[in-house]
Each structure stands twice: as structure tokens, then as C-alpha cells.
Amino acid sequence: MTSRTFSSGRLRLSAISVLSASVLALSACSSGEGPKNGSSDGATPSASASATASPSATPTPTPVYKPADAKGKAQNVPVPVKPALADKNSKEGVEAFTKYWFQVLSYAYETGNTALMESVSGPDCRFCNGLRDNVKNAWQGQRWIVGGKIQTPTVKPVFRPGAKSQQATIQVIQQEISIYKATGTLYQAATRASNRASQAVVRFDSTGWTVIDLGLIR
């Protein structure tokens, strides 16, 4: 995650079962003439009835996620789902929400859509705004980002009951970021992968948690 200072910066096809009925014919031959008067000296031929399968609806195939590459943008990127715990005013809630926030940021890098990120960021979070602007600039015109996905293996919240805001220290691992043009060529030199520590300040109100400040720990 590329940034400047503590408070500013950049950063299946479903298989259809087919039922087939096999017809088994057993015929017996008499020792001379054929059957008379509808009777036979041998076994009576028999056949199994054909089973008719009822047609069933074919499930709609699940869209397959495809990461971006030099040939084109990412496809069918899963939208991050906020866990219920992330709406709790607790230490565990701070941790769950902070992880979610970085998932939303990662989604923005991969899709160019920053709306979800903005919905959980305070308007005065300069670092958040810087990240948003960086993503929008990278995706301007016919450009797109390859890489930039984020992981947060460690989140350590500091929860003070009754406090207006809470803090969390986060290990942020981000893939290399490459910006491509419609021609399939690089727009600029790639930004190297990073593994940094960040600190987030979050606030809880009637709408839930919001990141109100964010920065790197130097």
C-alpha cells in the first residue's frame, strides 16, 4: 500500500442426468411350429417399460472470477461481504471491521470501484481520500490495475470501553501494482509489493464503524 505519512498518502456447468430405459426381450422357440391360439410352449416374451424422465431446470452457472492481466481487466470480482461482527461495538468488532475495510480497499484496486470504500471512510480521513484518488487516477480512461490485492494477516485492536474512537494496528501486505493501458502496455513503472504496518483510527455511531484516520507506522 503506497502512502505518504500517518494521515495522508497513496497507496460450474451443471451436469444434466439422462435416464435411459433398456428393453430386454426374451423369446423362446418351440420345437417345431410357432405358438398357436395365442399360447406358446416356451416363456412369454416380456419387456421393461420405458421410464420417462421429467425435465429439470438447469442451474445458472456461477460467474468465474478472473484476475486482471496485461490483456484485460479483472472479471467477476467478488464483492466483500461485511460480517455481522463488524457492526459490534467491541474489541472483536474493531478487528472484524478493520479487516473488512482493507478487503474493500483491495476490491477498489482490483475493480476501480471506490464507492464501497468511501461508504465506510470518514470524509476527513485524508489518507483514505488519498488512496481513493490514487485508485481513481490509475483507472482513468481505458486503464486498469493488475495486482494490488491486499491481505491483513494481523490486526491488533486497542479497545477502550466508552471511548469515542478506537485504534487498531494492522499488518498490510499488498501485491505489486501495475497499471496497463488499452494497448496492453504499462502506463508507468510498477509499484513494488509491500509489507507494512499501519494504524487505523475508527469511530462507532448509529451507522456502525467508520475509519476516520489512517497512516503508516514508520
Image (cartoon, rainbow, N blue to C red):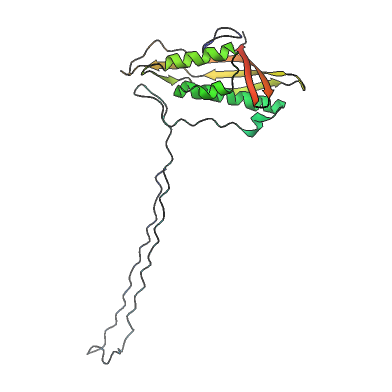
Q: How many marks?
A: 0
Using the image as rendered, state which of residue 47 and residue 216 is in the foreground.
216
- Using the rendered image of the protein, determine whether residue 150 is visible from the camera's viewpoint: no
* Relative side of 95 to 30, left or right: right
The residue at 57%/12% (across/down) is 127
In this view of the protein, which residue sits in the foreground, 39 or 97? 97
Q: Is residue 189 above or below residue 170?
A: above
- 93 with respect to 186 (left or right): right
Relative image position of residue 37 (x, y in whole percent):
27, 92
The quarter of the image holding the C terminus is top right
Name the quadrant containing residue 56.
bottom left
Query: Residue at 51% across / 23% down in the picture?
Result: 115
> As drawn, which residue projects farthest toward the front?
206
Residue 217 position in % (x across, y down): 62, 10
Residue shown at 34% from the left, 78% from the top = 46
- In percent of width and height, residue 136 lies at 45, 16
Asked if 212 appears above or below 15 in the picture, the reply is above
Q: Furthest-bottom residue in view?
A: 37
Choose top left, top right, bottom left or bottom right for residue 80.
top right
For residue 194, side relative to residue 13 (left or right): right
Locate residue 110, reporting x and y percent.
Answer: 46, 23
Q: 186 or 121: nearer the eye?
A: 121
The answer to whether residue 204 shows anywhere in this view is: yes
Q: Which residue is most to the left?
A: 33
